Image (cartoon, rainbow, N blue to C red):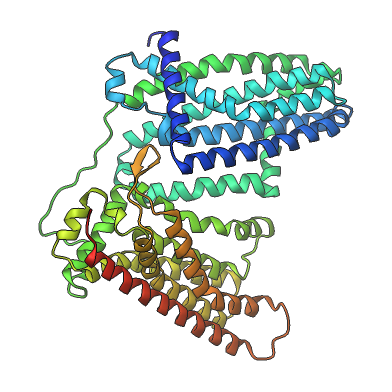
Amino acid sequence: MRRPSGRRARLIARTELRRTWRKLMGTTRGTLMLLGGGLGILIYSLAIGAGTFFLGGALVDSNPQTVRLATTAGIVGLLGLVGFFTLQHTVKSAGEPDAADGLLTTVPYEDASAGLLAAEVGRVLVALAIPILALVSGLAVGDAGILIAVVALIGSVTVALLGTVLGFGLGLVTKLVANRSAFIARHRASVGAAVSLILPLGWVAMTTVPTVQFRVLQLATQSPLSWPADVVLFVLGAGGDPVAAAVAAIGGFGALPVGAVACLWLAGRVWYADPVQPDHEFDADERTLSDRLLTGRVPTATRVVAQKSWLRAKRAPVTVQFAVMPFFFLVYHLQIVILERMVPPTLPLSAGLASAAAFGAAFSLNPLGGEEGVLPLTLTANVSGRAFVTGLVLAGALPGVVVTTLLVVGLGVAAGTPPVTLATGLTVALVATVAAPAIAVGAGVVFPKFESSSVQGHEVVVPSGWAFGLYFLVLGVAVAPGSLAYLLAVRDLFPLPFGKTWLLGGGLVTSSGIAIAGAVAGFLYAANRVATYRLD
């Protein structure tokens, strides 16, 4: 490995930053994200500045253990925040240059990787500039003093750089493992779905659940991450260990070049390694599980459309990754599970409805745009509009029924839900699971989307935000009566003038009626729209 050229690395970094700026300013969505993110950063910066201005002096005058705890918490929070988002960005897009074939035949890979790392550092520093400035200003203007402000400035920038290098390196390791692992290559859909769900939920748990935060902080104070607190204590003259302070300072600054070199080495391994290709032996007589389940039970055209949807999701999980979003609404329930060691009584139905919404959206929310380049072939194939839409609905409803049943029954038993209440909740969730794909396909043809978006470095056509909104609105109205009846049955919020059986039955019938009406309307409209759709 050779030493990278500073001039070429700067040119590549500048080009990457310009591309990032153009992506943000070139679309309405990017501009709104930039404005929203900027507003959020300003609000957090004001809070940080005010907090350090009013509380910095009190913290400096507190006992050494409090100073150590606060310093370690800040380091862990900043390091985790920067590292987590840098890792995600590296895996999705920043870990590989645009037009890699052309660039890597023009400049050495060391220059390209150094440029990408420098660009990532630039993005992080731009995002953190105002919060760090607010932190330092609050300490300097307040009672903490100039010296502590300087230490905070140097420490914050160093931790941010370490988080960037660490996240970039871990992102490259993730890409290398994904390229070299035959297991991941064979099970991309399952692994992708698990990672897409577990990582964000884990991050939310770490940032919102006090028990998890306390445990992480407890472990951090017993690790070298707490050594930089000795630097602060030494500067304050409050008894910091000079050896630990020196090791923390030397280790922090020394880890940056070592980490950068490791990132360059990893980039070469990732970019020049041929990804593992799982062996697919073609057998003309092989019958898959979907063949055994559907052959002879549904028309061939419908079966082929459903199998096409499942195969596309298996080969390119990123095309349906958006569908896991409803599960994030279960974070509140998960907090209760973690904090109170119990399953809340509302979780079974909530999980079932999240599953229904996810599987309903996965294959049906953009029926026309989801075909992408093969849309002309789909429209001219010997498949009627009704058969095509039925196949999409079946693709979401069939696996959705299985997952929803397992979630509702398993969580209902764990929560100790009465049998009648659990049966009603399960029925509401199953009705929603069957109706959701038909409602989604109707919303998808009302608001189709053909433009691609960048998802994990791939250009993918995802459903329109308007389609999402219409879909969730109709599905929400449909499940509201049954959900309200279930809530009143399990919570006993106030006395009811009639029995719970009548309440649950009324909610179930009302939700079923609305869901069926919405599903029929969406299905018929979508089938007619697909059958009569014409390309311009």
Residue that appears at 74% across and 35% down: 46
Say if 447 sits above or below 163 in the image.
Answer: below
User: Which quadrant of the rendered structure holds the N terminus?
Assistant: top left
| Between 180 and 77, the one nearer to me in the picture | 77
Q: 436 or 487, which is in the foreground?
A: 436
Name the one closer to the observer, 243 or 204. 204
Which residue corresponds to the image point at 39% horizontal and 14% vertical from the top-left? 111
Q: Is residue 258 above or below residue 53?
A: above
Give the residue drawn at x 53%, y 42%: 32
Q: Is residue 345 visible?
A: yes
Q: Quadrant of residue 2?
A: top left
Task: Indicate the position of residue 412 as horizontal and vertical percent values.
Answer: 55, 72
- Corner quadrant of residue 460: top left
The residue under the point 80% across, 31% down is 52
- Residue 289 visible to the viewer: no
Residue 294: quadrant of the picture: bottom left
**Residue 107's spot in the image, x, y percent?**
32, 13
Q: Is residue 469 left or right of residue 77?
A: left
In this picture, residue 292 sits left or right of residue 351: left
- Residue 519 position, x and y percent, is 38, 74
Tell me how many marks there are: 0
The x and y percentages for residue 512 are 46, 81
